[in-house]
Image: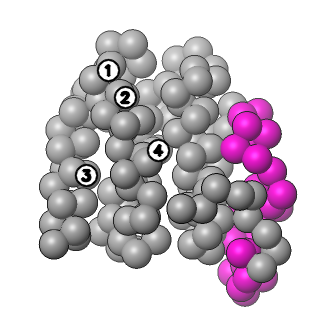
Amino acid sequence: MHNHIPTEQDWEGYQDDIDARYAYEYFFGKTIYELTEEFRQSVIERADELRFMPVRPFRYYIFALSHFIMEDNYLENEADMAIDCLFTLVLEKLNEYPENILPVMERLLPSLQFMADNVERYNISEEIYGSVPNRLQTILQRYRMLQH
């Protein structure tokens, strides 16, 4: 498990990718809690930057997005967007780079389950974002398949 703030060594190779460099500028040296304002200003952009991080920073900072949602730090009417970003990112990683996310899935699942169980609390439009419980089931199916 990766519980410390990612070091310069953890970010190794970020200089070679323009998107990873951009993520480094926003995230490097910050705790999960220090990123609340960054996510509040633009949850879509910050979530997108998670896609391009080296593996160790990703495994740490995915919890910044989860924490941002679970602690109700989003702006009014942006919870649905934040949850969509998280669920999309998790499924994308499971499908494209499972080795990057599998080691942290057990820690992520309780938050994902809570969000799926509380769609009304987050005022998520199924017409726009689809069924969050169904999306969770898709994530769980993919996760189980990868475990075998």
Q: Is residue 148 left or right of residue 56?
A: left
Q: Is residue 58 left or right of residue 25?
A: left
Residue 116 spot, x, y in % from top left: 29, 29
- Label 3 to label 2, Cα distance in Å? 13 Å
Q: Are marks 4 and 2 in contact (CB under 8 Å)?
A: no
The residue segment tinted magenta is 10-38
Give SS at disc 3: helix
Which residue: 65% across, 49% down? 46
Badge number at residue 70: none
Q: Which residue is mark 2?
A: 115
Residue 3 spot, x, y in % from top left: 64, 56
Closer to the chain start, of discs 4 and 2, is 4
Closer to the chain start, of discs 1 and 4, is 4
Mark 4 vs mark 2: in front: 2
Which residue: 73% across, 75% down? 11
Q: How is the image coloured?
A: one colour
Q: Is residue 54 visible?
A: yes
Q: Quadrant of residue 134?
A: top left
Q: Which residue is mark 4?
A: 85
- Number of residues whose C-alpha sits closer than 10 Å to that of mark 4, classed few (under 14), some (14–19) or many (20 or more): some
Q: Quadrant of residue 49?
A: bottom right
Badge number at residue 119: 1
Q: Amino acid at mark 1?
A: Val
Which residue: 55% across, 52% down? 62
Q: Is residue 125 visible?
A: no
The image shows residue 77, relative to residue 40, as above or below, that is: above
Closer to the chain start, of discs 4 and 3, is 4
Which residue: 62% across, 74% down? 54
Q: Which residue is mark 3?
A: 139
Q: Amino acid at mark 2?
A: Met
Is residue 105 part of the magenta span, yes or no? no
Q: Are marks 2 and 1 in contact (CB under 8 Å)?
A: yes
